[in-house]
């Protein structure tokens, strides 16, 4: 049975409309994805750990005693916000936010530093050597793996190492720390750490 010409034209027209719609939708999705990526890159360019005015200035990660005193009153708020963020990404560190903040205040550095390093090094302790509790890539060189007995021990040992080997030696920006912490990095390490600072602050 021969199909009527008008019906054939109608089918061709409908198929053309459907195909065009699919193509347009595909272009739209691709455009939105590209736009999202550009926005992320733009945000990263603006990241400033200590809210400095200079776009390319890297403020120090150390904190003065005055700022610590003023922030102690907000420790519960900092801990609660950090805990919410770490829970949202399923990081086991969410149980240790009080320890992280206590160590940072005691040693005089920004409380987000160890968390940001852990996020960069191990996706927040989710990708670490078995039974190592080492979220920071601390003392890991090839087959050599530094292991801790718990996350809390890891936090305290790494915090002490950051204080003695970096802060006390004047290495107080992400770029300074990167040059010693991971000397082979092309800058992406410091960039990522600053990115995670911003993510925590804006959560």
Image: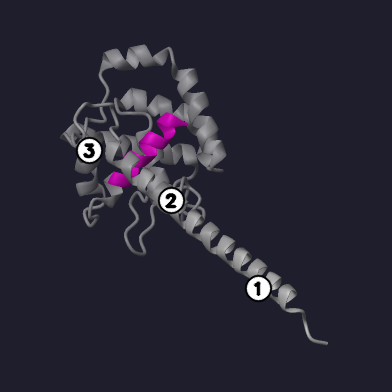
Q: Quadrant of residue 174?
A: top left
Circles 1 and 2, Cβ within 8 Å, touching? The answer is no
Left or right: 90, with 132 as reference point: right
Q: Quadrant of residue 185?
A: bottom left
Q: Quadrant of residue 16?
A: bottom right
Q: Which mark is residue 122?
A: 2
Q: Main secondary structure of the magenta part?
A: helix
Between marks 3 and 1 in the image, the one whose residue lies nearer the viewer: 1
Residue at (43, 12) in percent of width and height: 73
Residue 164: x %, y % from top left: 24, 35
Residue at (43, 33) in percent of width and height: 200
Residue at (70, 70) in percent of width and height: 10
Alpha-carbon span between mark 1 and mark 2: 54 Å
Between marks 1 and 2 in the image, the one whose residue lies nearer the viewer: 1
What secondary structure is found at the residue carrying circle 3?
A: loop
Circles 3 and 2, Cβ within 8 Å, touching? The answer is no
- The residue under label 1 is 12
Q: Where does the magenta region start and end?
A: 191-203
Between residues 91 and 44, which one lies in front from this camera angle? 44
Alpha-carbon span between mark 3 and mark 2: 21 Å
Report if residue 156 is visible in the image.
Answer: no
Q: Which mark is residue 166?
A: 3
Between residues 28 and 121, which one lies in front from this camera angle? 28
What secondary structure is found at the residue carrying circle 1?
A: helix
Residue 40: x %, y % from top left: 38, 44
N-term-proximal mark, 3 vs 1: 1
Left or right: 92, with 183 as reference point: right
């Amino acid at each position: 049975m021969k199909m009527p010409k008008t019906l054939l034209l109608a089918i061709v027209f409908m198929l053309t409309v459907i195909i065009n719609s699919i193509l347009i939708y595909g272009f739209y999705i691709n455009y939105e994805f590209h736009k999202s990526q550009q926005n992320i890159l733009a945000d990263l360019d603006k990241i400033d750990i200590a809210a400095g005015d200079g776009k390319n200035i890297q403020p120090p990660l150390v904190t003065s005693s005055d700022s610590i005193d003023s922030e102690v009153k907000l420790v519960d708020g900092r801990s609660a916000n950090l805990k919410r963020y770490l829970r949202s990404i399923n990081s086991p560190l969410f149980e240790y936010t009080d320890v992280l903040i206590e160590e940072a205040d005691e040693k005089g550095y920004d409380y987000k530093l160890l968390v940001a390093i852990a996020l960069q090094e191990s996706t927040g302790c989710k990708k670490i050597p078995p039974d190592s509790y080492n979220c920071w890539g601390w003392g890991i060189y090839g087959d050599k793996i530094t292991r801790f007995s718990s996350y809390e021990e890891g936090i305290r040992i790494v915090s002490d190492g950051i204080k003695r080997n970096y802060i006390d030696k004047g290495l107080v920006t992400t770029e300074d720390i990167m040059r010693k912490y991971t000397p082979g990095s092309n800058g992406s390490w410091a960039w990522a750490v600053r990115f995670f600072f911003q993510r925590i602050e804006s959560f």
